[in-house]
């Protein structure tokens, strides 16, 4: 019986811990410290040079814990922050569901959901993303990870009078078991997509024989990141519109009240001394 | 029409300095900066937002773009505008140290997503800079209006910075096949975003109101400067100058 009560008390404490704004602040501080550490060690360790060419978890699995510990710790803190965000958002919506300014209550939560979607995107891409790069000559092909083939039909390079390369593009054709599927054109900022894979033209070499640097990429989190980004922006726009409007009406006196409250508190502390 | 950048920079800085005596000179300095960027943009056929000269000049213009309207919400406009002018003049002078980048852009930078990503980033940097000015003013005279304006400016800056990050992600996905790269610049961008997230959440607690929030606003601009200049100059990244 007492054991059951003890478990319940621990659960309650845990629940309160995750419901606290103070927890969010401490978690953000911990994350900031870890990322600061990461930004310092990244340029110093050659292992990090391959981090952008493979999926994050794959990279972390093959590198030593001494190199990757801050990333593991950051993932741990992000997981805690996710739980904190979910619980705080749910509590805020439930507590204030009868509030008059519903849009003002819901707007930070929309931004929070957007943030969580972006985290989900990173999780998906970090788990099963793929990136590969190859130099491909004109009229030669490349085997894609999904078993299809891609052939670079024609590479166009546009140069100005000074010899600067202004633009480039390439015509590509997809094949499945020797059968042509479709043709497309790729250029900078305009990749071609085929069955979840993105085909990018990164660079070209017109001489001695036209060739292009092709990147094949799979980002399973891209759609979620876009949804998350849009939700975050929508939440922030709502927050700006409703909060600033509301604070223009109510805040000056309220803030003065809070600040005078702070002053009163410090006066009381002084008097106590 | 080719106007030497040094001439424009010196003239606008001089007008701002005269602005300490008469407010119309400040408007004149700002209009001259805008005119210079319009002329340079027309000449280049794009937004002048590549390289340290253009970005520093754009940032200095952005300071005044937001400082002038923000000053109207304060009882004593000059108290806020004077340090904002000093900040603007400093960045104009820094921009003069760098040679303008007038070469054609690489194809990967010729996109709406790049231009909006950079423009929104610098708008937010300017707002964070003004928030630091307000934070310093609050520490001197403890006026609640000053701290409240700092909060509002940071909120708008945070929105613009978040939008810049999202647009940067969309651009990176179309350009490089990924919306995220592990480089020091990206990490510092996240550090900056998390820092202002921390500010906005901390300010909801009574303890952080007033002096601690003002200090966070000042510290934030230090992180902005390192993210913009420090990382680009000292660390290897996709955003190197």
Image: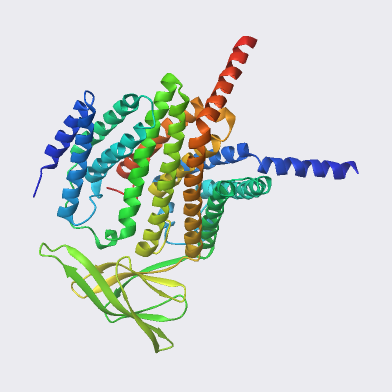
* Colour approach in the figure: rainbow
Residue lying at the far left in this picture: please name it: B1
All told, the count of numbered labels is 0
Q: Quadrant of residue A2?
A: top right
**Looking at the image, can residue A273 be seen?**
no
Describe residue B104's horizontal placement relative to residue B149 as left or right. Answer: left
Describe residue A271's horizontal placement relative to residue A71 as left or right. Answer: right
Q: Quadrant of residue B79?
A: top left
**Looking at the image, can residue A144 be seen?**
yes
Q: Position of residue A127 (x, y in %)?
A: 54, 62
Describe residue B34's horizontal placement relative to residue A41 as left or right. Answer: left
**Quick check: A232 above or below B3?**
below
Q: Residue at x 58, y 29 (%)?
A: B206
**Quick check: A263 above or below A129?**
above
Describe residue B74's horizontal placement relative to residue A120 as left or right. Answer: left
Q: Position of residue A237 (x, y in %)?
A: 47, 50
Q: Position of residue B78 (x, y in %)?
A: 31, 25
Front residue (pair A231, A84): A231
Front residue (pair A105, A38): A105
Q: Position of residue A109 (x, y in %)?
A: 57, 50
Q: Residue at x 18, y 44 (%)?
A: B35
Front residue (pair A232, A259): A259
Q: Residue at x 23, y 24 (%)?
A: B20
Residue lying at the far bottom in this picture: please name it: A179
């Amino acid at each position: 019986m007492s054991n059951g009560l003890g478990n319940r008390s621990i659960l309650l404490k845990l629940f309160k811990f995750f419901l606290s704004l103070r927890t969010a602040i401490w978690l953000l501080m911990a994350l900031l410290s870890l990322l600061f550490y990461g930004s310092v060690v990244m340029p110093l360790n050659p292992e990090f040079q391959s981090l952008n060419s493979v999926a994050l978890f794959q990279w972390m699995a093959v590198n030593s814990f001494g190199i990757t510990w801050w990333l593991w710790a950051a993932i741990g803190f992000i997981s805690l922050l996710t739980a904190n965000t979910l619980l705080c958002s749910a509590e805020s919506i439930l507590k204030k569901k009868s509030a008059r300014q519903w849009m003002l209550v819901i707007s930070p939560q929309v931004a929070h959901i957007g943030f969580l979607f972006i985290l989900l995107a990173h999780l998906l891409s970090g788990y099963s993303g793929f990136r590969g790069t190859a130099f491909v000559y004109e009229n030669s092909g490349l085997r894609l990870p999904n078993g299809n083939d891609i052939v670079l039909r024609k590479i166009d390079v546009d140069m100005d009078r000074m010899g600067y390369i202004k633009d480039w593009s390439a015509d590509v054709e997809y094949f499945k078991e020797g059968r042509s599927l479709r043709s497309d054109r790729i250029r900078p900022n305009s990749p071609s997509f085929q069955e979840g894979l993105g085909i990018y033209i990164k660079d070209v070499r017109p001489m001695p024989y036209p060739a292009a640097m092709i990147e094949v990429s799979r980002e399973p989190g891209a759609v979620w990141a876009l949804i998350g980004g849009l939700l975050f922006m929508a939440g922030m726009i709502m927050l700006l519109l409703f909060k600033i409007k509301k604070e223009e009406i109510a805040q000056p006196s309220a803030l003065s009240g809070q600040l005078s409250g702070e002053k009163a508190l410090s006066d009381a502390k002084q008097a106590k001394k | 029409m080719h106007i030497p950048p040094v001439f424009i920079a010196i003239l606008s800085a001089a007008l701002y300095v005269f602005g300490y005596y008469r407010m119309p000179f400040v408007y004149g300095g700002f209009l001259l900066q805008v005119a210079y960027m319009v002329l340079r943009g027309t000449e280049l056929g794009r937004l002048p937002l590549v390289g340290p000269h253009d970005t520093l000049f754009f940032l200095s213009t952005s300071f005044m773009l937001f400082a002038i309207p923000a000053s109207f919400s304060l009882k004593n406009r000059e108290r806020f505008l004077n340090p904002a002018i000093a900040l603007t003049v400093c960045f104009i002078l820094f921009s003069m140290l760098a040679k303008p980048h007038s070469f054609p852009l690489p194809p990967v930078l010729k996109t709406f997503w790049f231009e909006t990503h950079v423009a929104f980033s610098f708008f937010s940097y300017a707002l964070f800079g003004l928030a630091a000015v307000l934070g310093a003013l609050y520490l001197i005279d403890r006026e609640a209006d000053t701290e409240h304006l700092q909060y509002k400016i940071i909120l708008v800056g945070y929105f613009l910075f978040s939008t810049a990050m999202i647009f940067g992600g969309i651009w990176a996905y179309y350009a490089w096949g990924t919306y995220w790269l592990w480089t020091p610049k990206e990490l510092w961008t996240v550090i900056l975003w998390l820092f202002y997230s921390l500010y906005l959440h901390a300010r909801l607690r009574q303890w952080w109101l007033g002096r601690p929030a003002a200090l966070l606003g000042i510290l934030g601009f230090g992180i902005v400067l390192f993210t913009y200049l420090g990382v680009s100059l000292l660390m290897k990244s996709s955003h190197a100058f």
